[in-house]
């Protein structure tokens, strides 16, 4: 693709991110490509929803994030609104989402500009709710402590049908997860959990979360959920510290919605989207979480070694009993795969193999 306009999302607290952003600006100037900083806020500035931010930035077709996975999630929120590509620049942190080292960002932009990249699509989540989300008065002041201004509650998607039984569609997307969690420390949240329209169970828990395969290595993993390849299409429901015997995750198909209703005797519940508090539900309110119609388009400069990254990032160690074992590759990759394996996704052959 030929890049026409670049939006940059920068973690301003990291000198390496600021320096890499300057490199992106220099590249854009040399290529006569528009460049604008987006999702920039200060402590005294009101943040905007993604649609407003992307519109104010002139609808870039490539968004470059310079920071860690949190910065990438901010960029993904913006890219999803404009069907833009997103490139994550790695600053040496232990994230799963970033792609290219900061020192190579200009070379990566050259490659993208020539169209010599792979585009990996990722499933995202969106939701309907029984009512528009709101933050209680005083919540903003709590969120500002040690953090930036809160994102506003997601607006209603006016182009979607509204019906009393089906609630309102919210203009929000999540790359990692949507979480419903307790507000009061001394009171768990009580929820009815429905999968594909059927009641699974009523839970009393610290939180329940609905995650994508991308988000399976984030909060869901910390709560005991499964690791799922980001190339898979699935939706993962995971309870957090439930007071019940059944405490397992459930992996649902991508066309099966997960609905969460706050029960009448429950305390209030907070709705977080990719780690950002976006609203509060009262008893009787509900949200329905399902696969978003749009998918995130992520720039990949080469084959993605998700499982190698998983071993590295999670610092996986081998069982002590295997310490003296002679570990060899499952398939040695010294020759092209036979026909019955040719359809499989395997590591590339070494350069010296014909």
Image (cartoon, helix red, strand yellow):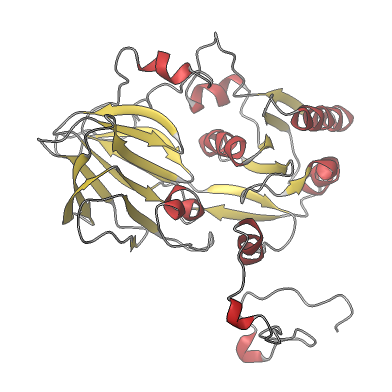
Residue 35, given in percent of the width and then of the height, sits at 74, 26
- Kindly indicate the quadrant of the structure image that contains residue 182: top left
Q: Position of residue 319 (x, y in %)?
A: 58, 76
Whether 249 is drawn above or below 40: the answer is below
- Where does the C terminus fall, quadrant-wise? bottom right
Closer to us: 351 or 7: 351
Residue 73, percent from left and from top: 55, 39
Q: Residue furthest top?
A: 44
Residue at (72, 44) in percent of width and height: 90
Q: Residue furthest left?
A: 264
Placement of 324 over or under 166, stated as above or below: below
Residue 231 in the image, given as x and y percentages of width and height: 54, 62
Q: Tell me what residue is drawn at x 56 percent, y 12 percent.
A: 43
Residue shown at the point (71%, 85%) measured from the top left: 328
Taking the view exactly as shown, the residue that stands out farthest to the front is 320
Q: Is residue 195 left or right of residue 150?
A: left
Of residues 154 and 42, the one nearer the viewer is 42
- 68, 131: nearer the viewer: 68
Give above or below for 307 relative to 130.
below
Residue 8, by quadrant, is top right
Residue closer to the observer: 20 or 76: 20
Q: How many marks?
A: 0
Q: Tell me which residue sits at (42%, 21%) in the image.
A: 152
């Amino acid at each position: 693709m030929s890049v026409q306009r670049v939006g940059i999302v920068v973690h301003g607290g990291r000198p390496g991110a600021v320096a890499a952003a300057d490199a992106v600006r220099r590249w854009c100037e040399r290529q006569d490509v528009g460049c604008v900083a987006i999702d920039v806020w200060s402590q005294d500035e009101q943040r905007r929803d993604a649609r407003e931010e992307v519109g104010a930035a002139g609808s870039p077709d490539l968004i470059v994030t310079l920071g860690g996975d949190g910065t990438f999630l901010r960029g993904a929120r913006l890219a999803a609104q404009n069907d833009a590509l997103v490139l994550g620049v790695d600053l040496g942190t232990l994230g799963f989402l970033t792609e290219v080292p900061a020192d190579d960002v200009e070379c990566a932009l050259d490659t993208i500009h020539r169209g010599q990249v792979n585009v990996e699509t990722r499933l995202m989540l969106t939701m309907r709710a029984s009512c528009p989300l709101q933050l209680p008065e005083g919540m903003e002041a709590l969120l500002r402590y040690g953090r930036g201004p809160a994102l506003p509650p997601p607006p209603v998607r006016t182009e979607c049908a509204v019906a009393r039984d089906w609630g309102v569609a919210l203009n929000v997307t999540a790359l990692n997860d949507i979480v419903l969690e307790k507000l009061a420390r001394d009171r768990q949240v009580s929820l009815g959990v429905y999968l594909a329209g059927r009641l699974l169970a009523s839970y009393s828990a610290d939180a329940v979360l609905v995650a994508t395969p991308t988000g399976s290595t984030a909060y869901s993993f910390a709560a005991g959920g499964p690791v799922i390849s980001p190339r898979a299409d699935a939706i993962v429901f995971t309870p957090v510290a439930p007071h019940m015997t059944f405490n397992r995750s459930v992996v649902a198909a991508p066309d099966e919605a997960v609905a969460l209703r706050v029960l009448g005797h429950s305390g209030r519940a907070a709705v977080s989207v990719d780690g950002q508090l976006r609203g509060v539900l009262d008893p009787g309110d509900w949200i329905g979480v399902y696969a978003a119609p749009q998918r995130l388009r992520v720039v990949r400069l080469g084959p993605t070694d998700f499982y190698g990254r998983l071993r590295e990032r999670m610092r996986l160690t081998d069982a002590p009993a295997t310490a003296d074992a002679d570990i060899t590759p499952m398939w040695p990759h010294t020759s092209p795969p036979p026909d019955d394996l040719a359809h499989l996704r395997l590591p590339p052959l070494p350069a010296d193999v014909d």
